[in-house]
Image (tube, coloured by chain):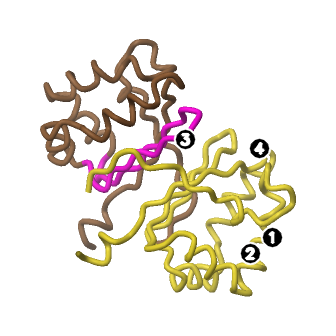
Chain colours: A yellow, B brown
Amino acid sequence: MSQECQRQRVCFLLQVKPEKLAEYRKRHREVWPEMRAALSEAGWHNYSLFLREDGLLIGYVETQDFQGALSRMATTDVNRRWQAEMAEFFDGVNGSRADEYMVPIPEVFHLP
Amino acid sequence: MSQECQRQRVCFLLQVKPEKLAEYRKRHREVWPEMRAALSEAGWHNYSLFLREDGLLIGYVETQDFQGALSRMATTDVNRRWQAEMAEFFDGVNGSRADEYMVPIPEVFHLP
């Protein structure tokens, strides 16, 4: 089995504050290179974020072990700094880091 | 540029009727082989459906041209039969085929 086949496909949802959509988009066109590198090193592959007009944010990522990928990011300094800047963009995270609210939605169908 | 790089990543949302979640899951464990083959032939790759407990359905698919992939499916007899069976599962599609309501959500971030 190839490495790619062993990956989980993970989808999670977050809620961006409607008044912060434009700034959220801007920040994500300019994600720090060291943040991108840290995600890759922590096993985040083919990672996309999709943002609906009302602020619903859909995350999709492929990884061998999502909880492990989250945990590895949590140990990095760059993630701490990134999540600190991002916290104010989200509704429903109670002032915490958004990555603590990335709860996987069950996959019910897959076609390779 | 590889073929994979030329693919768009598309996310869309639909709403499954809460009283039909269990049956929806069951049907998607048993998608007809000819429906799977038709999707592949029409250019649907790495296609996943994720279903939240409240019925929110998140679709993720990679394809070179999403409108083309939808159009190609629309010409197939198997899709007509499949969508006819699926129509009753969805809210908000006004009795139409759900695939006419697959509106892409803008992607705001991607990490390969």
For this rendering, which residue is in front, B2 or B55? Answer: B55
Q: Earlier in the sequence, mark 2 or mark 4?
A: 4
Q: Earlier in the sequence, mark 4 or mark 1?
A: 4
Circle 1 crowding by C-alpha within 10 Å: few under 14, some 14–19, many from 20: few
Q: Which residue is mark 2?
A: A82
Q: Are marks 3 and 4 in contact (CB under 8 Å)?
A: no
Q: Which residue is mark 3?
A: B52
* Amino acid at the residue labelled 4: Pro
Q: Secondary structure at mark 1?
A: helix
Q: Which residue is mark 1?
A: A85
Q: Which residue is mark 4?
A: A18
Q: Position of residue B14 (x, y in %)?
A: 48, 32
Q: Secondary structure at mark 4?
A: helix
* Amino acid at the residue labelled 2: Trp
Q: Secondary structure at mark 3?
A: loop
Q: Secondary structure at mark 2?
A: helix
Given the image, what chain letter belongs to the residue carrying mark 4? Answer: A
Q: Quadrant of residue A94?
A: bottom right
Q: Position of residue A82 (x, y in %)?
A: 74, 75
Q: Nearer the viewer, mark 2 or mark 3?
A: 3
With respect to residue A53, does A80 lie above or below? below
* Amino acid at the residue labelled 1: Glu
Q: Are marks 1 and 2 in contact (CB under 8 Å)?
A: yes
Circle 4 crowding by C-alpha within 10 Å: few under 14, some 14–19, many from 20: some
Q: Nearer the viewer, mark 3 or mark 4?
A: 3
Given the image, what chain letter belongs to the residue carrying mark 3? Answer: B
Given the image, what chain letter belongs to the residue carrying mark 1? Answer: A
Q: Residue visible at 69% across and 86% down?
A: A76
Distance of mark 3 from mark 1, alpha carbons? 28 Å
Q: Left or right: A93 with respect to B42?
A: right
Distance of mark 2 from mark 4, alpha carbons? 20 Å
